[in-house]
Image: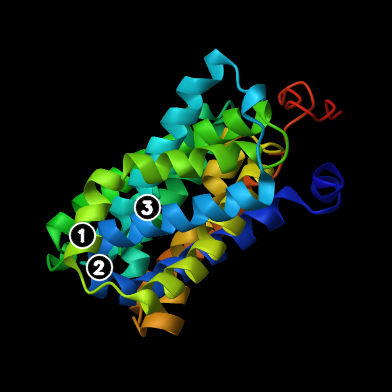
């Protein structure tokens, strides 16, 4: 069923849907951050998401080989800390700005992985758009927030590479169902103390559970399915659209009004993302068949 869905739905549309859902969940998390902190919010999202995925997917542990463990553990770690550091950034700087800075991670992956000069040109154009979105010349930005977003970007770059690798190895989204609980375990040390020290009650838990159903469950699943059919370069540079979505969701949900210069940056990153998608579908030779599914192509 998953294989038929992937063949019918274009990979780029799954990526776009995932980006919108991720930014919506991040915006909705702002109220929770005020109650239990960014690390507590990220940890609860991973815990709830892990429970949902284990119940829905029921991945088989017998199919895990010893050589699969490093990738699963690494993906779980970068997923958990990517969310944790990003929410810490959102607590201090606008959502669109945080996404723009974080985007530098997958942008670097796209540039290094590209085999064509045009791939580097589109990445550079996206970088110009990122600079316009951040407006560093104003000198009013929170440096700690910038640092948190940059660390999240490093994790995001690793997340893209590892998600494609794990997605190739395991059928459907079973790899995701294995890594999100690992993410919860890794972030317990920073998340649990904030939850215990914050204003936690059942209403917060219900809200976080709803957000977790959006991200990581639905959105990360869409990303994993898309990455199995796209190159690192195409997917990484397509993500240039995500800062634009961050600005849009920040405006609609958090009333964070972008400046005219930031709107110009949005236009540049959208252009770069659309251009980079051309020729970015992975062939059957590039994508090894996952366990339990036939080789595509």
In whole angstroms, how far apart are the C-alphas of marks 2 and 3? Answer: 15 Å
Judge whether residue 240 can be spotted in this image. no
Residue 177 lies, with reference to residue 290, above or below; the image says below
Circle 1 SS class: helix
Q: Residue 17, how many percent across, how many down?
A: 63, 62
Q: At 77% from the left edge and 29% from the top edge, which residue is drawn?
A: 283
- Name the residue nearer the viewer: 184 or 159: 184
**Left or right: 241 as drawn, with respect to 203:** right
Q: At 58% from the left edge and 42% from the top edge, which residue is drawn?
A: 176
Q: Which residue is mark 2?
A: 36
Q: At 83% from the left edge and 42% from the top edge, which residue is drawn?
A: 3
Counting residues from the N terminus, which is met first, the one under dot 1 or under dot 2? Answer: 2
In whole angstroms, how far apart are the C-alphas of marks 1 and 2? Answer: 6 Å
Counting residues from the N terminus, which is met first, the one under dot 2 or under dot 3? Answer: 2
- Name the residue nearer the viewer: 249 or 279: 249
Residue 83 image label: 3
Q: Which residue is mark 1?
A: 194
Number of numbered discs on residues: 3
Q: Residue 234, how many percent across, how many down?
A: 61, 41
- Name the residue nearer the viewer: 195 or 137: 195
> Residue 136's quadrant in the figure?
bottom left
Residue 124 lies, with reference to residue 168, above or below; the image says below
**Could you classify mark 1 by the number of other residues whose Cα lies within 10 Å: few (under 14), some (14-19), or many (20 or more)?**
many
Q: At 73% from the left edge and 22% from the top edge, which residue is drawn?
A: 288
Asked if the residues shown at circle 1 and circle 2 are in contact, with their CB atoms under 8 angstroms apart, the answer is yes
The type of colouring in the image is: rainbow
Asked if the residues shown at circle 3 and circle 1 are in contact, with their CB atoms under 8 angstroms apart, the answer is no
Q: Residue 63, how many percent across, how many down?
A: 67, 23
Circle 2 SS class: helix
Judge whether residue 19 can be spotted in this image. yes
């Amino acid at each position: 069923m998953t294989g038929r869905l992937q063949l019918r739905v274009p990979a780029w549309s799954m990526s776009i849907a995932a980006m919108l859902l991720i930014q919506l969940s991040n915006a909705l998390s702002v109220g929770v951050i005020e109650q239990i902190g960014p690390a507590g919010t990220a940890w609860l999202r991973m815990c709830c998401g892990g429970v949902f995925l284990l119940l829905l997917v029921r991945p088989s542990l017998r199919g895990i080989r010893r050589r699969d463990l490093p990738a699963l553990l690494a993906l779980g770690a970068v997923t958990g800390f990517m969310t944790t550091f990003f929410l810490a950034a959102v607590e201090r700087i606008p959502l669109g700005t945080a996404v723009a800075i974080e985007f530098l991670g997958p942008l670097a992956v796209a540039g290094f992985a590209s085999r064509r000069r045009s791939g580097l040109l589109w990445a550079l154009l996206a970088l110009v758009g990122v600079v316009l979105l951040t407006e560093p010349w104003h000198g009013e930005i929170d440096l700690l927030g910038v640092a948190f977003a940059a660390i999240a970007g490093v994790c995001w770059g690793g997340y893209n590479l590892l998600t494609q690798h794990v997605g190739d190895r395991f059928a459907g989204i079973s790899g995701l169902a294995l890594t999100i609980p690992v993410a919860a375990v890794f972030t317990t040390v920073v998340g649990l103390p904030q939850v215990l020290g914050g204003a936690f009650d059942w209403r917060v838990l219900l809200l976080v559970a709803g957000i977790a159903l959006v991200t990581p469950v639905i959105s990360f699943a869409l990303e994993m399915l898309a990455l199995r059919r796209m190159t690192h370069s195409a997917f990484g540079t397509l993500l240039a659209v995500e800062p634009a979505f961050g600005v849009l969701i920040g405006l609609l949900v958090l009333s964070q009004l972008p400046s005219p210069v930031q709107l110009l940056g949005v236009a540049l990153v959208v252009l770069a993302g659309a251009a980079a998608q051309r020729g970015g579908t992975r062939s059957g030779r590039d994508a090894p068949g996952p366990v339990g599914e036939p080789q595509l192509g």
